[in-house]
Image: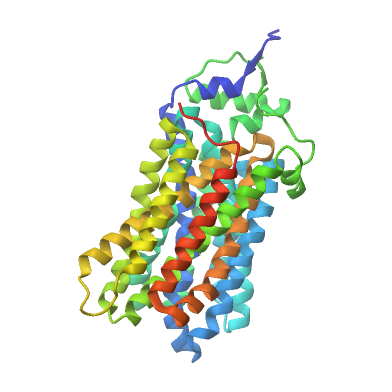
Amino acid sequence: MNTAQVDVGRLLDEGNWSRYQKFVVLLTALTIIFDGADNQLLGFAIPSMMRDWSLPRAAFANVAAVGFVGMMIGGAIGGIVGDRLGRRVALIASMLTFGTLTLIISTVHGIGALAGMRFLVGLGLGGAMPNATALSAELVPRRFRPFSVTLTIVCIPLGGTLAGILAQRALPAVGWRGLFMIGGLVPFVVAFLLMALLPESPRFLARHPRRWPALIKILQRAGYSPAPDTAFADPHEQGVARVSVGTLLSPEFRADTVALWGAYLSCLLSVYLGFTWVPSMLTGAGLPSLAATGLTVFNLGGVVGAIAGSLVISRMGSKVTMLTMTAGAIAGALVMRSMVLSPSSPILPIVVMLAITGGLINAVQTTMFALAAHVYPTSVRSTGVGVGSGIGRAGAVLSTYAGAWALDTGGSPAFFSLVAGAMSVCAISLALIKRHIPAS
């Protein structure tokens, strides 16, 4: 009988990133692509729904807001489920939830039913990200963890791009009901595929002796050779007896939790100010042909910035890297505040500054998931990420009102001043976090 315990955390942290581990990260990223796609479907469908139901655009504002509220609650619920029952269970359940309910949206016949379904879809969408984050973080070596988590979360805008392609083709052919039917059916089917292919987090399994045989199989696929009777431990990941949201505010985590919540809230406020209002701002400035391009570069700049930022974090640590990116975002917003947006304005400088500013804002937001995964241990990781991202959704809700106020009162200068102010709060919050990812 083998009585020696294997430190599974150290084994994974110091090991190689095998082909199987990369495959699992890609599977996890796949769930976030569909999460991002489903999240964006409503925006593409609203013009068609307005025509069918003879409703103004303003009638759909509360539908969008209630979806964010659902994601706030879903993040907390999904995180707790992930820490108690497993990341795999919670992630697949989230996909089944938002897939099934998106299918149901294709049958609704009124704004009230749409709002109710959108809230329930939000529960599933919110529950996916914390568990995808935890699973990506807990399977790979420490030196690749920021890149792995960022690669997973950066699939959200890629999912939005997929939704745009789908909407462009589906809306003329099958209408908005067909769009939601396709958008719900695909993740529902993929969830069943993941039941066969997606493993549980090794660090989660190490906490449950009855599940060590499954852990041994996963480690063997990853290139390790544990004996059949191996016992496991993860001494650097201290357990919490019963996970709850209150655990995050215990003396051990309180300071970092509050600072992380401030960073999520202020950064997601900036992100959604861009998502929601950049097209309207450019159109109102007499640049309607630039509206779609402006939002695209705002998003795609974030993909490049997030991946580059994660690679720098692996070498220099998260504090220096994230504060530098935040400072760059503030500077970019202040430069845009001083720019004149009008039909006679040069187009290239506007596009370049939107790409730089949006890229840095999105890069900070995306790498924040890697930071949150580092702040919390295995026993509370999904809950910590889920509640943090849920708090951030309050910034998304706030952006719908704050952006309109800024543009109505002071135009683009007031709008970019608001962005700079929000990112300044983010910088202060990030500076206050003690458990930053160390330099390698």
Please give left or right for residue 53 compared with residue 85 in the image.
left
Q: Residue at x 39, y 36 (%)?
A: 312
Comparing 287 with 95, the one in front is: 287
Task: Estimate the x, y position of residue 39 in percent, counting from the top left.
Answer: 50, 64
Q: Is residue 254 above or below residue 221?
A: below
User: Which residue is at the far top?
Assistant: 1
Q: Residue at x 37, y 68 (%)?
A: 337
Please give left or right for residue 204 compared with residue 150 in the image.
right
User: Which residue is at the far right?
Assistant: 241
Whether residue 398 is visible to the viewer of this picture, yes or no, is yes
Task: Estimate the x, y position of residue 101 in percent, counting from the top left.
Answer: 59, 66
Task: Estimate the x, y position of residue 430 in percent, counting from the top left.
Answer: 54, 46
Q: Quadrant of residue 292?
A: bottom left
Task: Estimate the x, y position of residue 397 in percent, counting from the top left.
Answer: 57, 69
Looking at the rendering, in which quadrant would you find the N terminus?
A: top right
Q: Quadrant of residue 124?
A: bottom right
- The image's colour scheme reads rainbow
Comparing 25 with 102, the one in front is: 25
Looking at the rendering, in which quadrant would you find the C terminus?
A: top left
User: Which residue is at the far bottom?
Assistant: 54
Q: Quadrant of residue 231?
A: top right
Comparing 396 with 92, the one in front is: 396
Q: Residue at x 48, y 67 (%)?
A: 418
Q: How many marks?
A: 0
Q: Is residue 172 above or below residue 317?
A: below
Whether residue 38 is visible to the viewer of this picture, yes or no, is no
